[in-house]
Amino acid sequence: MQLIDSHCHLDAAEFDSDRSAVMARAAAAGVVAQVVPAVTAGSWAKLKSVCAQHPGLYPAFGLHPMFLAEHRPEHLAALGEWIERERPCAIGECGLDFFIEGLDPDRQRHYFNGQLQLARDHRLPLIVHARRAVEEVILSIRRTGGLRGVVHSFSGSPEQARQLWDLGFLIGLGGPITYPRANRLRTLVAGMPLEFLLLETDAPDQPDLAIHGQRNEPARLTHIVETVAALRRQPVAEIATQTTANARRLFNLPAR
């Protein structure tokens, strides 16, 4: 069984002391590739280095809305230069976050729309963060046009999911679906077309129920795929095969 973690922050400081061991556990669990999205311009160089040192890690470069205080207008131009030079698998993590107070919505929109344009110009997929902002994210994607990507840690409605699929976007799901109270997400994953699903851990964040409150890591992706299989009443191998193919197709990852 081969799995792809479509969203993992393996460059995070939480992994600095044991990154190689984390990678070894992921490989033992069948995780053959991980997409590692950036969050700030200041993190791009470290992320590039981490991915270069560990086979199976694929970088994406972007400007995350939660780190708005660290972004500068010139970072969008710098991002375009990084994309030209590095040819990452995606642009992101980018998006909108209307949950956290104090994050200027207009400044968020400025950086998000700039990254949408870069994705269209460079024909790269997007990794999108949308918290309490799914509807506006959909409108922005539709307005820009010619885009594809994934809305990670999807938290919207079934109708919003269908709109995203129609626009060429997949949804990423991880630890939250393992919690019994996540009724809407669990119902969605149980009935949705499997070709629009990506699996993710968002490590070191969003741990699954069994490790609640602990550091998450990509080896936990096995618990995500098992949960999806149980909710859909399908063999684990079928879920793994389809979601891995989805990730390879979206991010243009090599077969292994």
Image: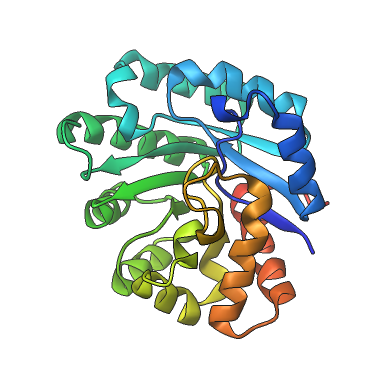
Camera sees residue 56 = no
Asked if residue 63 lies left or right of residue 7, the reply is left
Residue 55 percent location from the top left of the image? 78, 35
* In the depicted structure, whether residue 222 falls above or below residue 89: below
In which quadrant of the rendered image does the N terminus lie? bottom right
Quarter assignment of residue 154: bottom left
Seen as rendered, the residue at the extreme bottom is: 233
Where does residue 5 sit, x and y in percent of width and height?
63, 50
Q: How is the image coloured?
A: rainbow
x and y percent of residue 252 in the render?
A: 66, 48
- In the image, what residue occupies the spot 71% across and 38% down? 22
Say if 163 sits above or below 44 in the image.
Answer: below
Q: Left of 101 or right of it: where is 3?
A: right
Q: Residue at x 23, y 57 (%)?
A: 135
Toward the viewer: 15 or 77? 15
Residue drawn 49% across the image and 80% down it:
190
Q: In this picture, is 148 found above or below 165?
A: above
The answer to whether 179 appears left or right of 252 in the picture is: left
Q: Report the number of numbered marks.
A: 0
Q: Toward the viewer: 78 or 174?
A: 174
Q: Residue at x 21, y 44 (%)?
A: 98
Q: Is residue 56 above or below residue 132?
A: above
Q: Seen in the image, is 208 located left or right of residue 223?
A: left
Q: Locate residue 53: give its quadrant.
A: top right
Q: Position of residue 18 (x, y in %)?
A: 70, 29
Q: Can residue 191 be seen in the rendering of this structure?
A: yes
